[in-house]
Amino acid sequence: MTTAANTVAQKKGFGATLWDWLTTVDHKKIGILYLIGGGFFFVLGGIEALMIRLQLLVPNNDFVSAGFFNELITMHGTTMIFLAAMPLLFGFMNAIVPLQIGARDVAFPFINSLGFWMFFFGGLFLNLSWFIDAAPDAGWTSYASLSIASTGHGIDFYAIGLQIAGAGTLMAGINFLVTIINMRAPGMTYMRMPLFTWTTFVASALILFAFPPLTVGLFFLTFDRMFGGNFFHVDGGGNTIIWEHIFWIFGHPEVYILVLPSFGIFSEIFSIFSRKRLFGYSAMVFATVLIGFLGFMVWAHHMFTVGLGPTANAIFAVATMAIAVPTGVKIFNWLLTMWGGSIRITTPMLYALGFIPSFVMGGVTGVQQGAAPLDYQLHDSYFIVAHFHYVIVGGVVLAILAATHLYWPKMFGTMLSEKLGKVTFWFFFIGFHMTFFLQHFLGLMGMPRRVWTYNKDQGWDLFNAISSVGALLMAIGVIVLVINIIMTTAKNERVGNDPWEDGRTLEWAIPSPPPFYNFPQTPLVRGLDTFWIEKKEGNKRGYIAAEPISDIHMPNGSFIPFVMTLGLFIAGFGAMFRLEHSWGLPVLIGGLVLTFLAMATRSIKDDLGFYVTKDEIIRTEKEILRSERGSN
Amino acid sequence: MMKGLKKWRFPAMLAALALVLSGCGEEYLSALRPSGEVGQEQFNLLILTSLIMLLVILVVVVIYVAALVKFRRSRLGEDHMPDDVEGSHKLEFIWTAIPILLLLIIAIPTVYYTYKLGDVSAMEKTDDDGNPEHLVVDVTAKLYWWEFEYPEYGIVTAQELVVPTGEKVFFNLKAADVKHSFWIPAIGGKMDTNVDNLNKFYLVFDKESKDLKDGVFYGKCAELCGPSHALMDFKVKTMNRDDFDGWVAAMKETEGQMPDKDSADAGEAAFAQSCIGCHATSGVGASGAAGPNMATFGDRNRVAGYLDHDKENIVNWIQDPQKYKPGNLMPAFDSLSDEDLDAIADYLLGLKVEE
């Protein structure tokens, strides 16, 4: 703990530290909060996955009941997508993107904090369903006929919990868009932005267009279940296929919201650890934008068996295949980035190397499923389970694990153990392929997905057993990672600005972790891979300043986002129990009033932020320099 | 890349891959061992796409391994500074164009078969006497069982679909409660049974099921429909047209077959007392029953679609259906005496239309 900001934090008592985290609007701290929240839900979703695989280890197993199994699969999917993968990526976006573009914070620090708390309270709300009533049990897709028929409050938890978390995501997306458009340092043109920033930018645009449909769909579901609506009740003139469309108009872009930032992370890694500029940068940017665009044109390939008719199926089949082209461009550009480079196999690079074959595998099976007539066989079988885990685990989770190692020193100022990192990788990577490769064949051999158990003598026993053992290996990998984090934190060996030695972008030009104002002077960007250019020209400082040192304007922390979200959280319970308990309606109104009061306070009370004075900046910078010399 | 392949090699590779894959899974259940035209066409598409995709994987792996071997820092030295290459328009053009060509090879049969498999216009066709030219089966999916009505013959059955081989059989699919999906993997792909509308498609059954291990093909529900989704199996009996006509005639003969409350057969009497309200014993009728039709129960292969077809399971089921299929709609008949249960089971096993 060497920076000034942290020294101050260390002097505080527990209460003050807690208050600091509850009210922080610093993008770096919010990034850490996202990692903690997302990490917690990742472990939770992982435990659910292990229970699923334990149940399917042998035929006719009764380790869990049929109803509970459906709750497990629903919560596993929902948790992993909404509460683990996305927040973890947001964590890295928050921590890194402002640094990459040379900014001091995001455009709307207050909204950044609000977005985090909404994700966290939404996730909490959803998971409280385990203890109150029952967890949702209609699958993460929550198809309308089943979700309307589902008894108990499980689906209500799903609808309200995701509504709160989803609103947070939408805010985060808008915030990143504005940040990247408006807050770039001088000289940081669009075509000089690092790929992680580019992919964050495109993913945020996808969030902007994909989340409103989800919001609408969830409101329909909420109205139908809690307020007597008729959107999906066929008897009342509703239509359940509408839910499928709305869900997938959100759901398919969601895949790209997850996978594009992952592509960005891997682009950084390939370039850093091949000691070479990303091959075909402009093609990579174009491919990213194209994938984002096409991502909105293909949702009905999730619905080939719904009976949309041959014309719709054919159009969506061909559109789906088209996505393979820009994705292929990316794969080959990564390979050519390595080609002619100087490849150093660190833990992040190991993940990137594991990602290529895994993701290619997920990509090609995606094309197969895009062939509509073939999909009639593959749809809703274990083949699709294998496919999307190859994409999400082989793409997104590997990227998150890679980024954890890559950016840990930047975020916490200390390196995770490379040795343990590699142990984690091998357990996770082997376990992953063991779990999911054979599931392709299970699907082709007639095993439907989402089955609670299966009779023996259907030829599925061996592959299921192998698959379950693989899941255990993945769990061991994650446990080793947790041990790694604990040991690294305990040792706390400090590192300098550029711990990987081959950093290319601006975040590696400043201390690890950076002071709370990031850059004492806004940097001037002269090209792609700014830091690399300066390093090659012998600029010891790592970047050229675009301004003299002067007072820096920073936002104040605020407790209002927490209160605002708490109100919605409370109102959610009121809405849910309104019909069966007399306290329901008052709680619903009370919660909303609390939120509106918090909003009013925010609007009425001026908060002009504060200035970090020139003297303080100079003092802090000197202190950082001194401690770095000390540790080296 | 394709130039390197001699003309004969591609079909040979297709055949080889087909042979390897067909070793996978059970004949009565696996999509890799298709027993019908639709399944075969889908299987061919699987092989075609798999080969093209294997080719792509091969190219990626070759570049990947070569790069890893040639350009390791441990080989090149710690101080080696590679040239920063911006890109290559030529290479980028190649890896944009070739995938487009490969995808076109997949897209053409995809579009062709999408229309072919989606063509149900023959369903309405009739011959000169006004009889339908093709067999049409109305499928209703319910929590957690399947009802099969043959509108042309005025007969209905449940849990076991009986169809003739060697001809197109058309299906009208719908769900009575929540969405399900109708899938016979060894015969062809699935189609959803929606609550909103009627879906139509066809399948062709090439092989008679009597030589299979259980004498039936396995059918599955492929859409999550509640706790017992995993147990919502059905079976398919396929037979040549003559045998099928015989089966239809036998089904028609069950017209008016009603259990008698005063029967000397204790099972029949008990059934008439407790079960007939939901379960018909005549195969003549239409879909829409509260419980599965029992006219062919003795011919069936499973109790409740998945349990071994014996007396013990019948008795267990009647006593506590929720234990075996949680969430199904049949109430428990735990007040029946053991003798009555035994007798009902015997009576049910005697309900047959096949020899």
Image (spheres, coloured by chain):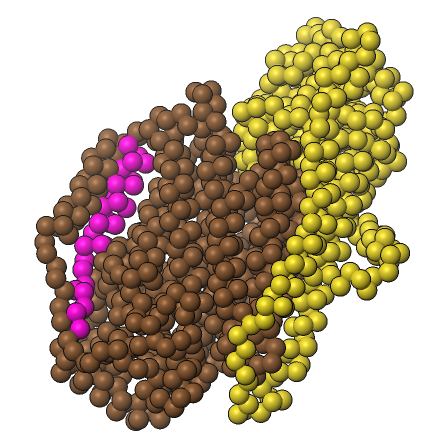
Chain colours: A brown, B yellow
Does A577 appear in magenta? yes
Percent from the top left, x then y, of residue A453?
A: 63, 44
Relative depth, front residue between A627 and B77: B77
Residue B197 lies left or right of residue B132; in this view the side is left
Residue A335 found in image quarter: bottom right
Q: Quadrant of the N terminus of chain A?
A: bottom left
Point 53% across, 88% down: residue: B81
* Looking at the image, residue B102 lies above or below residue B330: below
Point 64% across, 39% down: residue: A314
Percent from the top left, x then y, of residue A182?
A: 29, 62
* Looking at the image, residue B79 lies above or below residue B182: below
Q: Is residue A140 visible?
A: no
* Looking at the image, residue A449 lies above or below residue A403: above
Q: Main secondary structure of the magenta part?
A: helix
Relative depth, front residue between A58 and A215: A215
Does A16 appear in magenta? no
Relative depth, front residue between B64 and B263: B64
Q: Which residues are magenta?
A: A552-578
Percent from the top left, x then y, of residue A561?
A: 22, 54
